[in-house]
Structures are given as C-alpha cells and as structure tokens.
Image (spheres, rainbow, N blue to C red):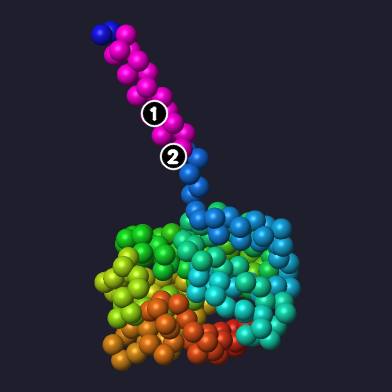
Amino acid sequence: MKRTLLIAMAALMAAFAAFAQNSAAKPKYTELYYQRASLFDALGVDSTNIVFLGNSLTHGCEWHELLDMPNVVNRGINGDIVEGIRERISSVVNGHPAKIFLMVGANDVSHDLTADSIVTAVTALIDYITEATPSTRLYVQSMLPINNSFGRYRLMKGKEQVIRDINARLEPEVRRRGLTWVNLNPAFCDADGNLRADFTNDGLHLLAPGYMVWRDIVLPYVKE
C-alpha cells in the first residue's frame, strides 16, 4: 500500500513538473510576432526612415507604396498589443528614425482591459520612445472605430465605448507631452459612430478605401 502511494505521488510530481515546464516554455506571443520581430531586428531603421508602428491595421498596408515614399517602413504586427510593441521597440528607437506614426490598442481592448489601463500603458510606451530617441518626431494616431454588425470578433462585442474612452483620455496626454495627436477616428465613423461598412469587410480591418482615407489624413504630417 505504501509503495503504491509513493509511486502515485512520484507520478503526480512528475506530471506537475512537466506541466510547469510546458507552461514556462509556452511563447508569450504568436509565431507571427516572433517572425516579424526577428525580421525587424535584422532590418533595423535609420534616421531617414518614417516608421508606421502598430498592430494588424498598420501591418495590413503597403505604406511605402500608398505614400509613394521608399523611406517609409512598416513595423506593424498582426495581433500586437502595447506590451508587445514595448518589447520589440529597440529595433526602431535604436535607429533614431525621422518620424514614428504609432497606433495601438485594439488587441488590448479585446483582452478585456479597461480604458484607463490601456491609456496608462500607451503613455508609458510614448514616454519610453521619446526618451530613447528624442530626435524622432512621434505622431500618436487615434484608435479607429469598430463595427460589430459583421459579427466577426466576439471579444470586441460591446467594446465600442471603450475605444471612444481611450481616444478621449489619450489625446490630452499626448498633447500635454507636446506631441502630435492625429485624430483619424471621425473620418472613419458612420452616423452611429461605428466603422463605416464600406471601409471594411469584417468590422475591424480595412479595405482599400479606408486606407486611402488614412493616407489623406496622415500625408501632411508625413511630409511636414
């Protein structure tokens, strides 16, 4: 009986050890995150570059073609969050680019974080960027609205007001730091304040007409 108990306890301890090892080995982010972050580390940036930095909304555009500027580089990663950008930001700030256009927050919202906690995280990221590369002009772009009528993203259901609250609270923080706030949101809203249906096919990501509007808004800032 005692031997059986000892064997059972040993097996249980081995199972716990295996679980702990597997948990520790589980990647923090997606495979795509590490693939693109590795590429960005290898490519780097320099002082002539204009960097578009963010999540899938940034990732989904060929910015250098859209803006007709070969020095514009895309540093967006699908699914990225504020913490993920912070952990890969060295490949951007170490090159002291001319400008950074930052948009982040949608995936943090989908993780059920509060508007206040997201704004706190974004402002900490902003402060880090401005301290790490004071010669870089940082432009903080508002979050875009969403459209849940498409029924695609369960974790974004009912999050419309959270996005509005983030924009409302982040703008004064950006301006207080003497940085440029690029308010994209109004141009993307329908009469109900949701993402225009003609700009998207899933309620979150953009089709070409949406990116064309985005281009027209940021182009004066890119060229100034």
Is 95 situated left or right of 209 in this image? Answer: right
Viewer-nearest residue: 85 or 203: 203
Residue 161, image quadrant: bottom left
> Horizontal placement of 148 versus 179: left or right?
left
**Where residue 22 sits: x, y (%)?**
46, 38
Q: What type is the residue that disc 1 sits on? A: Ala
Q: Which residues are magenta?
A: 3-22
Residue 106, relative to residue 5: is it above or below?
Answer: below
Q: Nearer the viewer, residue 64 or 155?
A: 155
In the drawing, what numbered circle is on residue 86?
A: none
Q: Classify 69 as above or below 162.
A: below
Give the number of the mark in front: 1 or 2. 1
Report x, y in % for residue 214: 52, 85
Which comes sooner in the sequence, label 1 or label 2?
1
SS class, disc 1? helix
Give the side of residue 138 with respect to residue 185, left or right.
right
Q: Main secondary structure of the magenta part?
A: helix
Figure quadrant of the C terminus? bottom right
Asked if residue 51 can be seen in this view, the reply is yes
The residue at which mark 1 appears reads as 15
Q: Mark 2 belongs to which amino acid?
A: Ser
- Identify the residue at horizontal 33%, vertical 79% (top origin): 150
Give the answer, above or below, for where 82 lies relative to 51: above
How far across and how far down the image is residue 204, in percent? 41, 76
Kindly report the distance in space between the C-alpha atoms of the residues bearing marks 1 and 2. 12 Å
Residues 41 and 92: in front is 41
Residue at numbered disc 2: 23
**What residue is rendered at 60% in x and 68% in y?**
75
**Residue 116 appears in view:** no
SS assignment at label 2 = helix
Find out whether residue 88 is within the magenta segment.
no
Pointer 1 with pointer 2, Cβ within 8 A: no
